[in-house]
Image (cartoon, rainbow, N blue to C red):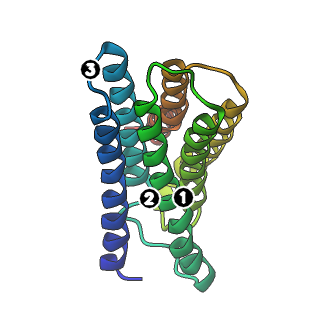
């Protein structure tokens, strides 16, 4: 595909990520009285959307897929579970914010952790199908593994009985752990290159 095709996939992704923000606002609007709990939960939902945006646009967007038929087709079709995960995250954030003050139901918990995990795992697999300069190959390879592991751990959080706010905080920390890991690896590789 051409750079304009990559840009269009990025535009589609950012539109879908905008829907997560809209879902958060819709969830807040369901409350007649705003409280600190509603506000904190809404901010955490917004941080999840920003984290997903950061992961995709920092690692995947602006990179052409590897120029083989299987990698190009894989790159295109991997955007389907990625966008489905983002859409499901929007539905989860809406339900989480709307249900603030009530115990978090297992269905909403699984929707949240499953959607975020699907998005992270899709991101990790997409990292293996894009053209990366040799200098950054090791960084992307390690960051893809960290993102995949992070998605798996987030999925396991569905087995917990955590309340809304602690669950969302842990999801955000795990979701952004690959970003921090990527920064550490990048600094290490820069030092290894020398001045």
Task: Find residue 159 and report its horizontal and vertical position in percent.
Answer: 73, 30
Residue farthest top in this picture? 36
- Label 1 or label 3, whichever lies nearer to me, is 3
Q: Which residue appears at 36% of the width and 58% of the height?
A: 16
Please state, as top left, top right, bottom left or bottom right, where the N terminus lies in the image. bottom left
Residue situated in front as seen by the camera: 82 or 55: 82
- Coordinates of residue 191 in the picture (x, y in percent): 45, 34
Q: Residue at x 42, y 53 (%)?
A: 56
**Image location of residue 3, percent across then percent down:** 33, 76
Q: Which residue is mark 2?
A: 60
Classify 10 Å Cα crowding around label 1: few (below 14), some (14-19), many (20 and above). many
Where disc 1 sits, the SS reads loop
Q: Nearer the viewer, residue 135 or 34?
A: 34
Which element is circle 2 on?
A: loop
Q: Quadrant of the C terminus?
A: top left
Q: Which mark is residue 34?
A: 3
Q: CA distance from mark 1 to mark 2?
A: 6 Å
**In the rendered image, the vertical position of residue 69 relative to residue 25, given as above or below:** below
Classify residue 140 as left or right of residue 152: left
Marker disc for residue 143: none
Residue lying at 31% horizontally and 44% vertically, measured from the top left: 21
Q: Are marks 1 and 2 in contact (CB under 8 Å)?
A: yes
Residue under numbered circle 1:
127
Spatial distance from mark 1 to mark 3, Cα to Cα? 40 Å
For the residue pair 84 and 95, the one nearer the viewer reads as: 95
- Where does residue 193 sit, x and y in percent of width and height? 46, 42
């Amino acid at each position: 595909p051409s750079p304009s095709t990559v840009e269009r996939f990025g535009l589609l992704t950012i539109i879908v990520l905008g829907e997560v923000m809209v879902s958060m606002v819709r969830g807040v609007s369901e409350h007649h009285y705003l409280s600190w709990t509603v506000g904190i939960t809404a901010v955490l939902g917004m941080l999840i959307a920003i984290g997903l945006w950061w992961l995709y646009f920092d690692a995947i967007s602006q990179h052409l897929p590897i120029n083989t038929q299987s990698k190009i087709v894989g790159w295109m079709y991997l955007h389907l579970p990625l966008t489905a995960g983002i859409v499901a995250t929007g539905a989860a954030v809406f339900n989480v914010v709307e249900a603030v003050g009530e115990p978090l139901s297992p269905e909403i918990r699984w929707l949240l952790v499953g959607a975020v995990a699907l998005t992270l795992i899709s991101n990790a697999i997409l990292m293996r199908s894009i053209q990366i300069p040799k200098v950054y190959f090791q960084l992307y390879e390690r960051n893809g593994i960290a993102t995949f592991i992070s998605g798996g751990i987030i999925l396991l959080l569905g087995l917990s009985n955590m309340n809304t706010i602690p669950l969302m905080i842990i999801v955000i920390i795990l979701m952004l752990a690959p970003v921090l890991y990527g920064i550490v690896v990048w600094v290490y590789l820069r030092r290894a290159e020398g001045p």
